[in-house]
Image (cartoon, rainbow, N blue to C red):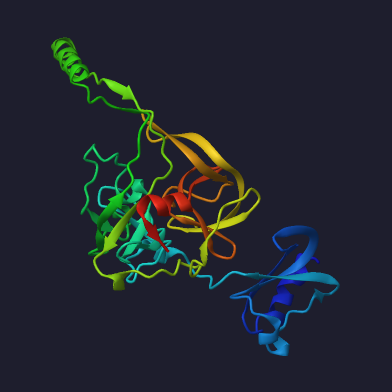
């Protein structure tokens, strides 16, 4: 079908109950691309045929071309993600008071107390701490939106840091008394000739990271809601498989979609120009994120949680397995 026919066709369908848009693409059947061209009908929510009025049912073909119905929810502009929102939803800006901004991933519940908590990354809610570096402390202020997004917007305090899983760097500051004494002696010698320089004695860390995660407790449970921004409720949890279609709702790039490329990934992640950390049992997807999307929950197309986004590039996105995240923090949806 030519593009010149698509736009006029939109007006034939836009008055149908639940229809919000129309386009051209391929027909998908049970998650598989049939490679057959189709008129794509965009709806707020897919509804069973027996629950629709006769005049609201999309025909199987239009002008001889197959049709396919895609659920997209309510499409809105993305500016609200960086504003103060109460109740705040997963998918919006959040962060530790020392961090620029990341993404509120999901509402989870303490398995022992049932307390509602805010889930995101350690590097979003706890400033990338290993637990011994004073980057953050339990009880630190959590802001929504994050500090970078709150210029001139007022009081954005939403809660406090409750728990984090330490992130182990490849090289850590030595805790050996002899090594530290050696470091002090070297620095005293160097300061005589080059006071602008300093030596640090570091040790290799053999600990492997499985997750980059933390939770915060809201000031009031009324200040958060579990409905993911522009996506809806989380249906449950699943394991990711290669080829699975995935999506996320994030602070920077909104709702984006991709595909799982690999599972069981072990990888070195750059923390800074001088620091890195080893992560294992990770999941790799195609490009679907930007800086500020860290902490987003990764979902299947039918809203089952697969993982927690924590790193990415222009070519790929990395996320922790959701089972590892929930077990490490002792929380559940």
| Residue drawn at x 66%, y 86% as measured from the top left | 51
Q: Is residue 314 above or below residue 171?
A: below
Residue 38 coordinates in the image, percent (x, y): 77, 66
The mark tally for this picture is: 0
Report which quarter residue 202 is drawn in.
top left
Q: Quadrant of the N terminus?
A: bottom right
Report which quarter residue 135 is drawn in.
top left
Tell me, yes or no, if residue 249 can be seen here.
yes
Q: Quadrant of the C terminus?
A: bottom left
Q: Is residue 89 left or right of residue 198?
A: right
Residue 315 coordinates in the image, percent (x, y): 57, 42
Residue 212 coordinates in the image, percent (x, y): 39, 45
Query: 234 and 54: which one is in front?
Result: 234
Report which quarter residue 42 is drawn in.
bottom right
Tell me, yes or no, if residue 308 can be seen here.
no
Query: 149 and 332: which one is in front?
Result: 332
Residue 332 coordinates in the image, percent (x, y): 41, 61
Q: Is residue 246 left or right of residue 312?
A: right
Q: Is residue 317 above or below residue 77?
A: above
């Amino acid at each position: 079908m030519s593009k010149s026919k698509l736009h006029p066709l939109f007006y034939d369908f836009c008055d149908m109950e639940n229809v919000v848009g129309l386009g051209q693409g391929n027909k998908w059947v049970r998650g598989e691309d049939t490679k057959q061209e189709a008129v794509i009908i965009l709806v707020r929510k897919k509804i069973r045929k027996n629950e629709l009025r006769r005049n609201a049912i999309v025909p199987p073909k239009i002008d001889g071309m197959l049709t396919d119905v895609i659920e997209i929810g309510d499409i809105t502009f993305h500016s609200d993600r960086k504003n103060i929102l109460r109740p705040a939803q997963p998918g919006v800006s959040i962060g530790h008071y020392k961090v620029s901004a990341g993404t509120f991933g999901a509402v989870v519940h303490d398995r022992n107390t049932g307390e509602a908590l805010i889930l995101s990354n350690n590097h979003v809610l706890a400033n990338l701490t290993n637990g011994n570096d004073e980057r953050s402390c339990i009880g630190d202020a959590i802001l929504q939106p994050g500090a970078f997004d709150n210029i001139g917007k007022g009081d954005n305090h939403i809660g406090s840091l409750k728990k984090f899983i330490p992130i182990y760097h490849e090289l850590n500051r030595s805790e050996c008394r002899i090594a530290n004494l050696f470091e002090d002696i070297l620095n005293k010698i160097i300061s005589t000739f080059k006071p602008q320089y300093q030596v640090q004695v570091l040790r290799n860390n053999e600990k492997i990271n499985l997750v980059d995660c933390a939770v915060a407790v809201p000031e009031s449970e009324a200040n958060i809601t579990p409905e993911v921004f522009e996506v809806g409720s989380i249906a449950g949890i699943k394991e990711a498989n290669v080829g699975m279609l995935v999506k996320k709702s994030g602070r920077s790039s909104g709702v984006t979609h991709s595909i799982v490329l690999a599972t069981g990934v072990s990888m070195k992640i750059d923390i800074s120009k001088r620091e890195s950390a080893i992560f294992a049992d990770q999941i790799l997807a195609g490009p679907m994120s930007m800086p500020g999307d860290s902490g987003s929950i990764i979902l299947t197309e039918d809203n089952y949680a697969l993982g927690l986004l924590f790193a990415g590039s222009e070519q790929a996105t990395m996320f922790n397995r959701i089972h590892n995240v929930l077990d490490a923090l002792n929380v559940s949806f």
